[in-house]
Amino acid sequence: MKYFNLQKHSSKILTLIVFLLGLAGTFYLYDLKQAQERMNANVEFQSQANLRARDISSEFNRSFFQVTSVANLFASSNWVNYVEFSNFIESVYPTFPAGRRLSVLRSIDLDQKEETIAKIKENPQPQFSDFAIFDLIDGNVVTPPSIHQNRLNFVQYTFPQPTQNHFYGRNIRPQSPVGPRFFRVIENQQPYISSISGPLPGLISKPFFLHMQPIIKKQENGSTTFEGIIVSSQHIEDIFGNNVIQQSLDQFNYRILDQNGNCYQYPQKQFTPASERSSTELPPLSFQSTINVEGSQWQLIILPKVALEDTSIELLRSILVAGIALSALVALLIFQILNQRTKLTQLVKVKTEQLHDQNVQLESAVTYAEKSAQIKSEFLANMSHEIRTPLNGIYGFSQLLLETELTKQQSNFIKQMDTSVNHLMTVINDILDFSKIESGNIAIESVPFSIYKLIDFIHNSLNENAKEKGIDFNINILSDIKPDLLGDIVRTNQVLLNLCSNAIKFTNKGNVTVNIYMELVDPTDSSSDITLRFEVVDTGIGLTPEQRKGLFVAFTQADTSTTRNFGGTGLGLAISQRLCQLMGGEITVKSEYGVGSTFTASMVFRQNKNIIIVDDLDERYEPPLKLLVVDDNPLALDVLQLHLTKMNAVVTSFDNGKDAVAHLSNNPDPYDAVLLDWTLPEMDGKQIIEAILALQLNKLPKFIVISSYDLSIIESASTDLPIKSILQKPCLESKLFYAIKGAVNDTEVDAQLITDSKTLIGFNILVAEDNPINQIVIKTMLTNAKANITIVNNGQECIDTLVKSDTFDVILMDIHMPIMDGIEAAKFIRALDNKKQASIPIIALTANVMKKDVDYYLLNGMDSHVAKPVDFNQLKLTIIELAAKNKLHSK
């Protein structure tokens, strides 16, 4: 009986011991886990806080860089007018922060007063018409300016426009609110950052600090002069505007302490001056970092919003319950657990081996797919290169033959050969474009172009095809248009060529009509983006509902019969749809079988404000010139008037030819020159010039055309007109200056930068090309254009020839050549000690057209790229443009 009692008690004791051991182990594991979690949380906090500290430091640096950039603008310029100042601010600050102000405080010697005031008054804005320098006493009393150390220190410009009076011209005195800081910067000529200040009622609504950046101009003799100070107010809360920082606000609180101990807390947006702060200890879980602010050291403190909560009681309750249950059952379940564990271990081992095999197979499949994609890309690039290279010879010789005397039949044969070459190029380009779209590597460009140039291209490309089929091909503009746009004209042409050529292909009688509509994306903003809709209407065979379903699917065609009445790759519409989507639009279709179809392509473009390219021109007309400007684009008129006025010209402008001709007929005072666009409503450029000639003025002005239109078309249409120069928008500011000056003076010296675009007379061109056929083609083309040509067979010969002569204007460089390829040669040339030789323009002339290849060439010394088969007009314009820019930079 005692034995059983002892055994019973022993079981209880053993059960109690197991229970207590389990409970003790549970508490131990809990404490260990809690310490580990706290350590991990602290490490993660320090890491995240360090990243946010870097973000905040970067925001400080970006803000200071913006102010420094404005100071550098004034330090590097002889004079900056208000438009240049405000335009520069808008380019440096994509969105200028609300409630902020950036001002130019000018410091001049007393004897510079009248000259400086006169220059400021030249600004056309009304606020500068009666500009004067004055003292403002007690905020409303205006007195003559006080002089400090024989200098005047006053507000020249500010951004944005001030609402209060007596802002521009206000003299800064030592007693002024900003005076002590201003004269401190004058004295040491070093940037100054103020401490954080609270809001100023009526002026600044949020805590802020001031950034003062001196304008130090370097003179030719190496000395420097102090020109003034850029003063910018900076809301301290704007430092936290970064998206990443904003996303962290549910995790962290931020404090910034300046060098004087003033404190700003975010996101609470609370400012506490140093005098009101109490010294409080920071919690152990915090992050501190030093931010160097233009010589001052500010402290950044980051605190976690939610501290680690002590949940031990809840955890203990759960663990106690689990521990009691486990301790009570451990003796009964230990065998089953161990047995089950063994089975599970074996199962996990089998599953792990299976998963490993699957991962190996997956990695092998991914590697194979990547290798296949690479092989496919390289194959397409190589095939394109290998096809384009002989095509260059075929296309080049056909173009050269067309310039010789041929019979009508021979000329017909050559044109048919050109048609076949163009068709083959379309197939190649479709395949390459589809490959780019599949891989996501296709990019949309933004270049200036004229809507009229696009219309002429489509009409000239397809009108003959339509005539051969006996159908009418018409292009109508059915809404008011803004002709000068920014967008990808090449891709736009590609979409329209595809839609229009399809319409002509599937139309056997009747007509194909393109209706063009233009509308503002934002009707309330006249300068907003433009939506262009091209409606291609045909009277062709039409489409069934089933055919329309697969219309934009790659490799699918409506005509799938074995007789194949209509050819094609089945890629054109799929590519065109994707291109429209990349340009912010789409293609839609309406069609009735046997009646006809209407395809509508929409695309979004920007209005072209980039009429003039500023290239640091420092020239003025002496004496002033009187100019008449005609352009239907109001943006172009404003830009031209601004730049011509800066060149010391008196400008009268009109947005149509009819008013301009009427003005000339009623105005006896002669004009020196007429600057006009070529494509205008009612009267185009040619009609305007003919109308002016018919006035028989006592003094005939010189005519200069500046247009986004195709220059070769203007040249062909104006052979019998007295046009002095034809310029392409956007035009270099200096090129415009010399064109007008040379035209007015009838001299070639002043117009030396304006090259005759009809020929390449006087150009010395070095050609590196190893293919004998391509050598003959390019030499004949350039020689016919009156250029002087030197041909070499590889990159090494190109370098050897270049270093022996300084006479070459441009190099045409093939890429794949023996001994030394074009890339190696370009790199070597750019490293030459002779600056003239090292900076010579290099054009990559190659059959490689993949974007990654072209980008690689441009990153490795090439200035431009022209694809084979060579479009000679494109090559000629590229040569002229690069040579002109090179002359400007070396001038």
Image (spheres, grey):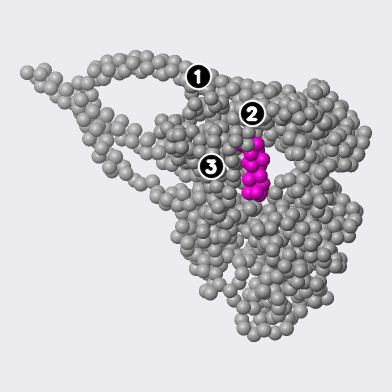
Q: CA distance from mark 1 to mark 2?
A: 21 Å
Disc sitting over residue 840 in the figure: none
Residue 11 x/y as whole percent: 16, 23
Q: Residues within 10 Å of mark 1 (few under 14, many from 20)?
A: few
Q: Nearer the viewer, mark 3 or mark 2?
A: 3
Q: Principal SS element in the magenta part?
A: helix
Q: Is residue 475 left or right of residue 84?
A: left
Above or below residue 868? Residue 187 is: below
Which residue is under mark 1? 562
Q: Residues within 10 Å of mark 2 (few under 14, many from 20)?
A: few
Q: Quadrant of residue 850?
A: top right
Q: Which residue is depicted at the point 76% across and 41% down?
A: 878
Q: Which residues are magenta?
A: 448-466
Above or below residue 133? Residue 704 is: above
Q: Is label 3 in a helix, a strand or a loop?
A: strand
Q: Amino acid at mark 1?
A: Thr
* Earlier-in-chain disc, 1 versus 2: 2
Q: Which residue is depicted at the point 68% across and 62% down?
A: 656
Which residue is under mark 2? 423
Q: Residues within 10 Å of mark 3 (few under 14, many from 20)?
A: many
Which residue is under mark 3? 536
* Earlier-in-chain disc, 3 versus 2: 2
Q: Are marks 1 and 3 in contact (CB under 8 Å)?
A: no
Q: Are marks 3 and 2 in contact (CB under 8 Å)?
A: no
Q: Is residue 693 left or right of residue 7?
A: right
* Earlier-in-chain disc, 1 versus 3: 3
Q: Is residue 163 magenta?
A: no
Q: Which residue is depicted at the point 68% across and 76% down?
A: 170
